Image (cartoon, rainbow, N blue to C red):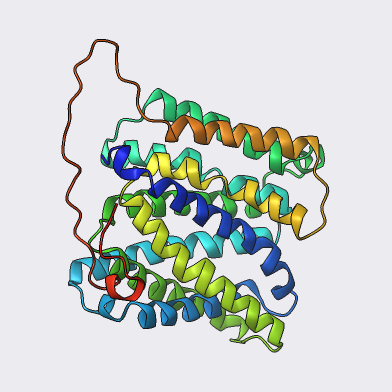
Amino acid sequence: MVGFRSSRLAVPALLLMAALWGSTLVVMKGVYAHMSPENLLASRFAMAAAAFGILFPKAWRTNMRTMVKGVILGVLFAAGQLLQAIGLGTTQAAMNGFITSLYVVFTPLLAAVIFRKKVSNAVWGAVALATVGMGVLALDPSTLSSGFGIGQLLTLASAVAYAGHIVATGRFANPSNVASLGLYQTITVAIVCTIAALPGGLSVPAHMEDWLALAYLAIICGTFTTFIQSWGQARVESTRAAVIMCTEPLWGAIFAIGLGGEALTGRITIGGLAILAAMALVIRPPRRRRGAPQHHSEPPVVQVDPAWTPQFGMDRMP
């Protein structure tokens, strides 16, 4: 398990990723008026894969094992994206968002079942707090009467896929393969989403504003977020990472208020505070028992991935 000291920069990185993902809802709202969800996902991740290949040219050269891991991550992430998009067609947006966010519950369950990872009481407490917070943030009484049909089941399946992606990323990612893992993941997502878009016909944006939105979604919220998720999860265990990343709906609400003109309500405030409390539980350093000896150990030696060092000037890792 990665220690707290080595994860200090990983926590803000994962928070930044969640904030960027939260901003996508405001951006995608306008693009969906001109493109189907499948075509938007296909175009977005095709552009993201191209950007990855250009920014990290050495990432192409890796071993078959890393390629396979990237493909697995890509299939899981594409499944989550497509199932959520299809489920949204017959599910209210608030309910869709809440059910999807249940990946924070499925992540420790999958980690415990598949990899026999013990989950601390603090993390389970954070999961419960985060779930309550997301429910308060996303749901209102009117959404609770809509029933549970095929749309909700598909959305629930997307939450499981996202949880699998988080657990697998935590298992596969290490400081030496971040760029290559991200490259082959985005290529796989682009291929899967393109195949899913074929029955309805492929299309690309027709307006300049849609191209600009697509570039933001692809490069900033595709290439960059994929990279920092792998980078962060190489340093923070998956169950804690899931709680940090579940701040996404809170960021979405903040962007909706700041950019979309929506009102700040008591529900948003209470839900946001619960999510922040959950995050505080998982990012705090472990307490040292009184009288216990202090163990001073050297920080782990981190090998820098040569695929991304030259482009960003990162010749040292924290």
Specify whether residue 91 is in view: no
Q: Residue furthest bottom?
A: 206
Which of the two residues, 290 or 243, is positioned nearer the viewer here?
A: 290
Residue 174 is situated, as x and y percent measured from the top left of the image, at: 25, 56
User: Is 238 situated left or right of 247 in this image?
Assistant: left
Residue at position x 44%, y 71% in the image: 189
Which of the two residues, 2 or 293, is positioned nearer the viewer here?
A: 293
Residue at position x 66%, y 38% in the image: 272
User: Is 71 situated left or right of 86 in this image?
Assistant: left
State the quadrant of the N terminus.
top left
Residue at position x 20%, y 74% in the image: 62
Residue 10 in the image: above or below residue 115: below
Residue 184 is situated, as x and y percent measured from the top left of the image, at: 33, 72
Residue 80 is situated, as x and y percent measured from the top left of the image, at: 50, 59
Residue at position x 40%, y 37% in the image: 109
Which of the two residues, 261 or 125, is positioned nearer the viewer here?
A: 261
* Image quadrant assignment for residue 317: bottom left
* Image quadrant assignment for residue 3: top left
Residue 58 is situated, as x and y percent measured from the top left of the image, at: 25, 79
* Image quadrant assignment for residue 270: top right
Query: Looking at the image, how many numbered discs can be counted on the residues?
Result: 0
